[in-house]
Image (tube, grey):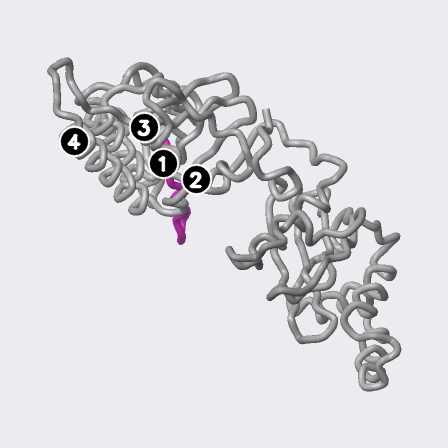
Amino acid sequence: MDFQVSGDKLFATGEIVPGDAQRFAQTIARVPKSENGVSGLTIALESPGGDLFEGINLGLAIRTASLPSLVMRGKLCASACAIAFLGGKFQGAVSAAETRRLEPGARLAFHGYRLATDEIQIANETLDAVRVSNAIILEYASRMGSVDLGALAELLTVPPEKMEIIDTPREISALGILLVGQPLKAPKDWPMNACRAAVAEQLSVLDAIGAEDRLLGEAEPMANLEAFRRRLLDDKYHAADETAAAVRAAVMKLPAGDALDLLAGGALFLEQGKVGVWRVQLERGAGFYFDACYGIAKFDSGSISTILVSGVSPSMVVGHHNVLAGHPANTPLW
């Protein structure tokens, strides 16, 4: 690999070969650091792959150096490069976090690995070698953090001669990736998608109905926060229920934003910036105990929240998501 610093990026390009992790460490050692030892750089990866175990070593070196990893729009980071990409990390003054960044249009690609050489190997020996390599990759990914190991294991079943481009919300979320650069535009049916995802998180694996059929009809827009408050109150504390009258009266005395925070059990920050709210009717039963889902879009920040409401129990589940929640989970974004 070739390592070149330009501005706030360390560009790492070319095939990954033994010794690249050491060359990376030597490059980053020459970069000026802040008082807390941080370079402030992001490593921008572009590589068709190469040596698998050197890719792991490079990922570990990236983690040690506390550099966020990035694949830029139109660039390819495949195979061993994708493994190294998992090492991305941001180091702040008082905290650290896994930080893997992807620009829409980038090609981050995973596949399975074949360790056989040109020599003829007995089939079960080759299989054992693949199992060992996959176990090493999964152990490494576990150490890197914020990776769904089940999803990664599935990616490692892709035949070596093929590649799986990471471009769906499910894959991006499973690998703990943050989309950066040109923002994605949420589709018109984003409330249905967000509520579908929220419902799926609550379903048993044995649920015969599934998330798709739990959503009834179309999403209903709330005209404003006041309309949202009244509809949420009706879902949670029915007007016909005499025992709920005191609760309804108390909630109606509060400002709409405060009332909604109280009902949700936490701050929703609905009075900060432009907000849109939609309601989706749900089918309860068979171990699923919610009657309605609210999708809340904060257009200024590009974030989405969901609220699952039960009309017959204290259950209310609030979820906070990025814009990916508004897209179909398995549909490519680019």
> Which residue is depicted at the point 30% across and 39% down?
63
* Residue receiving disc 2: 175
Seen at 64% across and 71% down, the residue is 315
Judged from the image, the secondary structure of the residue bearing numbered disc 2 is: loop
Q: Do the residues under discs 4 and 1 have CB atoms within 8 angstroms?
A: no
Residues tagged 1 and 2 counted as in contact (Cβ below 8 A): yes
Amino acid on which the number 1 mark rests in the picture: Leu
Q: Earlier in the sequence, mark 4 or mark 2?
A: 4
Nearest to the eye among marks 3 and 2: give it.
Answer: 3
148 in the magenta segment: no
Answer above or below: position of 210 versus 255. Answer: above
Q: Secondary structure at mark 3?
A: loop
Q: Quick one: label 3, few (<14), some, or many (20+) residues within 10 Å?
A: many
Counting from the top left corner in percent of width and height, residue 171 is at 49, 37
Q: Earlier in the sequence, mark 1 or mark 2?
A: 1
Left or right of 179, for residue 218: right
Residue named by callout 1: 86
Camera-side mark, 4 or 1: 4
Comparing labels 4 and 2, the label whose residue is closer to the camera: 4
Residue carrying label 3: 112
Mark 3 → mark 4, Cα distance in angstroms? 17 Å
Q: Is residue 119 above or below residue 174?
A: above
**Disc 4: CA contacts within 10 A as few (<14), some (14-19) or many (>=20):** few
